[in-house]
């Protein structure tokens, strides 16, 4: 009897503890507040704990602030865009997700639809007439616009997305855009109702509003592409729609535009879409128990998700509104296993949101970065990456990864620079008309590679590989471009942001604006400097720990993960500091001093996967050149490539692949600090 009595005591204790707690739900309107109160009353009468208290805010943004800053509320249901903002800016986490149908579960798909036989592809949308569900709608606006911006197809000046879209398409119907300054273009295709009323309204008065309206805009020939949900075409064709405009439409007469430039049948939306759109989710503070939130709502949905119940969690009809507290189309709520906004939203949607919000995140504190080719915005002197021959070039330094290795390797790999007899330096000097490539030892160095360099303020130390040369380093290479010494600068993606818009107070940079510069893309296009993720020569990876192929990588990571929990914080009280070399009179010993934390590499367990195709291609562009008659690769300097069988195994623990600088004292102290810890496996 002892066991059951203990279990009963624990159960009663839990019930008592829950009854003393409360979940404060944030609402954004009077009808939603009323539904929340009805839900609270229904839960309480059913004995569901903890009790719900309803707190009314003025908007979703206000509710997020009430949850995160004021701590006057605990939970709210948000859509994908709001989850992105709440997670990225306020640290909130999604804990309970909505499910809409069994076919797609906790998501749906945003697609671009065209008529079969149309010449339009995802790469030829510029100048095409477009149909959208409504301004700021997820599928009809946020995803397609964000995707076009993030992929480099749509350039945005000064983060003015509305202007960019109005200039990009050849006229649109974007219901709700009539209140903006670009209504002439964004409302050009809208028609209003049968009487011509409500033109471009974000309401049913506009015949081209919402999913079916945007598809009707395409079907009636007003637009050439419609941005809708994956189910829209199938729901409005083949006799499934009642309105006369769609009764004769056949689904086989329409196709989807795929991200790779191809097209597909409308039934192939799983592989051919712009982004998977995440379902709405309940978000809470990081310190809130997500499991408790699901248990509360799960008890409620078991009793109140059926039409026969006294209260309907997933219906707002009684309040004269739609989608109050939860979307009316919700079939059930499910717990979210990985409670991070990134995991819930998914890679495709995250990229689209970054593009839409003009959020390049250049202050990213990871060690990975992009190599970019920067030029001035100049319509009278525009050239592409394929037209660099004879131009003047600015480089951060000889053998610098972003300033030399990657751009030169990329140009070699693409066949523009062709070294003879392994002489890469001469080949580069003959390709560009003049350059500044600072170097430590200029012996036998082609003079044209120093032609643009200026030295210090007194003109001394010209072309030296240190800060005495004003055009040395990434900021120096950008200065070379900014001061019209060169036509192109090869730098990191952060360089422009760090030296424009007031971020660098030095006289040469004080007045520079980031919008006056562009990037040269490998596909021959130009892009905004904020679009570096889609327009770059290569992504440089973080440093990584390397092991033999037969090593148990989980054992290695387990050891290092345990170690960083104990010794990774510079302020830890355990004596040893993993990511600090100051006690050993050196820098970056074992790990880079700037390391914050080690993380697993996931599936990137080969050097090719970790380095990325662009970086590998650039390096192989260098290494593929054969010395005349020698049968050996030329110019291996700076190559991180080891034997192909060796790959990064655990994490971007910053250190070159071969770990050449292990410090004996720090290495032994790491061992001693771990003491008796012995990983298994």
Image (cartoon, rainbow, N blue to C red):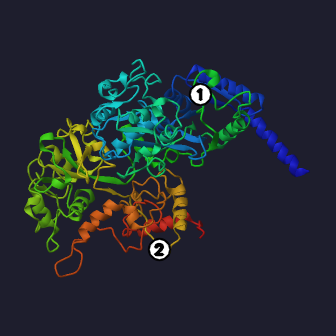
Extreme right residue here?
A: 1
Q: Verify CB contact (< 8 Å) between mark 1 and mark 2.
A: no
Q: Quadrant of residue 335?
A: top right
The percent position of residue 120, horizontal first and vertical second, equals 32, 45
Instruction: Name the disc covering residue 599, or none.
Output: none
Q: Is residue 435 left or right of residue 73?
A: left
Disc 2 residue crowd, few under 14, some 14–19, many 20+, Cα 10 Å: some
Residue 664 in view here: yes
* Residue drawn at 24 percent across, 61 percent down: 410
Say which of marks 1 and 2 sits in front.
Answer: 1
Q: Is residue 214 left or right of residue 525?
A: right
The percent position of residue 657, horizontal first and vertical second, equals 38, 67
**SS under mark 1:** loop
Q: Is residue 120 left or right of residue 339?
A: left
The percent position of residue 210, horizontal first and vertical second, equals 46, 31
Where 644 falls versus 470 (above or below)?
below
Instruction: Name the disc covering residue 324, or none.
Output: 1
Instruction: Name the disc covering residue 549, or none.
Output: 2
* Observer-nearest of 519 and 364: 519
Where 631 falls versus 505 (above or below)?
below
Disc on the earlier residue, 1 or 2? 1
Q: Quadrant of residue 76?
A: top right
């Amino acid at each position: 009897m002892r066991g059951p009595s203990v279990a009963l005591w624990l159960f009663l204790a839990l019930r008592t503890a829950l009854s003393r707690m409360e979940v404060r739900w944030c609402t954004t309107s009077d009808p939603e507040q009323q539904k929340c109160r009805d839900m609270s009353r229904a839960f309480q009468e059913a004995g569901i704990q903890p009790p719900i208290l309803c707190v009314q805010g003025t908007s979703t943004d206000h509710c997020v602030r009430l949850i995160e800053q004021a701590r006057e509320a605990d939970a709210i249901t948000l859509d994908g865009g709001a989850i992105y903002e709440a997670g990225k800016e306020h640290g909130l986490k999604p804990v309970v997700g909505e499910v809409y149908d069994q076919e797609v579960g906790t998501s749906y798909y945003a697609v671009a639809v065209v008529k079969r036989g149309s010449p339009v592809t995802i790469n030829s949308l510029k100048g095409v007439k477009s149909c959208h569900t409504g301004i700021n709608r997820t599928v009809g606006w946020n995803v397609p616009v964000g995707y076009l911006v993030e992929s480099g197809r749509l350039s945005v000046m000064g983060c003015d997305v509305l202007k960019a879209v109005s200039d990009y398409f050849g006229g649109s119907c974007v219901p709700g855009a009539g209140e903006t300054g670009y209504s002439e273009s964004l409302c050009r295709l809208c028609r209003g109702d049968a009487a011509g009323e409500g033109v471009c309204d974000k309401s049913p008065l506009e015949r081209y509003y919402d999913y079916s309206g945007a598809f009707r805009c395409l079907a009636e020939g007003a637009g050439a592409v419609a941005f809708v949900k994956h189910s829209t075409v199938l729901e409005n064709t083949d006799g499934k729609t009642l309105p006369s405009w769609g009764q004769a439409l056949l689904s086989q007469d329409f196709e989807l535009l795929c991200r790779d430039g191809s097209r597909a049948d409308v039934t192939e939306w799983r592989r051919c879409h712009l982004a998977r759109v995440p379902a709405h989710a309940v978000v809470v503070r990081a310190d809130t128990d997500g499991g408790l939130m699901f248990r509360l709502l799960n008890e409620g949905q078991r009793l109140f998700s059926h039409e026969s119940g006294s209260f309907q969690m997933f219906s707002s009809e009684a309040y004269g509104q739609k989608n109050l507290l939860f979307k009316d189309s919700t079939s059930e709520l499910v717990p979210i296993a990985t409670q991070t906004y990134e995991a819930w939203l998914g890679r495709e949607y995250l990229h689209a949101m970054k593009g839409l919000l003009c959020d390049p995140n250049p202050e990213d504190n990871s060690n990975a970065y992009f190599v970019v080719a920067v030029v001035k915005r100049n319509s009278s002197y525009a050239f592409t990456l394929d037209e660099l021959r004879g131009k003047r070039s600015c480089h951060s330094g000889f053998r610098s990864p972003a300033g030399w290795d990657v751009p030169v390797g990329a140009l070699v790999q693409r066949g523009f620079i062709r070294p003879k007899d392994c002489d890469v330096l001469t080949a580069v000097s003959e390709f560009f008309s003049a350059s500044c490539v600072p170097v430590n030892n200029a012996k036998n160095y082609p003079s044209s590679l120093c032609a643009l360099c200026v030295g210090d303020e007194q003109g001394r130390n010209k072309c030296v590989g240190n800060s005495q040369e004003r055009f040395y380093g990434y900021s120096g290479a950008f200065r070379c471009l900014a001061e019209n010494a060169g036509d192109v600068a090869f730098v990191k993606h952060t360089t422009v942001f760090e030296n424009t818009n007031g971020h660098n107070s030095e006289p040469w940079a004080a007045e520079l604006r980031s919008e006056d510069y562009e990037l040269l893309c490998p596909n021959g296009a130009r892009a905004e400097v904020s679009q570096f993720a889609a327009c770059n020569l290569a992504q440089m990876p973080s440093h990584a720990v390397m092991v033999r192929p037969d090593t148990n990588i989980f054992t290695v990571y387990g050891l290092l993960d345990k170690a960083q929990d104990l010794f990774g914080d510079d302020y830890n009280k355990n004596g040893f500091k993993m990511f600090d070399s100051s006690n050993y009179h050196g820098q970056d010993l074992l790990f880079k001093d700037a390391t914050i934390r080690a993380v697993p590499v996931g599936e990137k367990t080969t050097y090719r996967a970790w380095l990325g195709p662009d970086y590998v291609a650039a390096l192989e562009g260098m290494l593929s050149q054969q010395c005349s008659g020698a049968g050996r690769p030329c110019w291996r300097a700076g190559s991180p490539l080891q034997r192909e069988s060796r790959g990064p195994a655990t994490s971007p623990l910053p250190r070159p692949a071969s770990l050449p600088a292990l410090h004996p004292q720090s290495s032994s102290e790491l061992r001693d600090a771990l003491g008796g810890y012995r990983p298994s496996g």
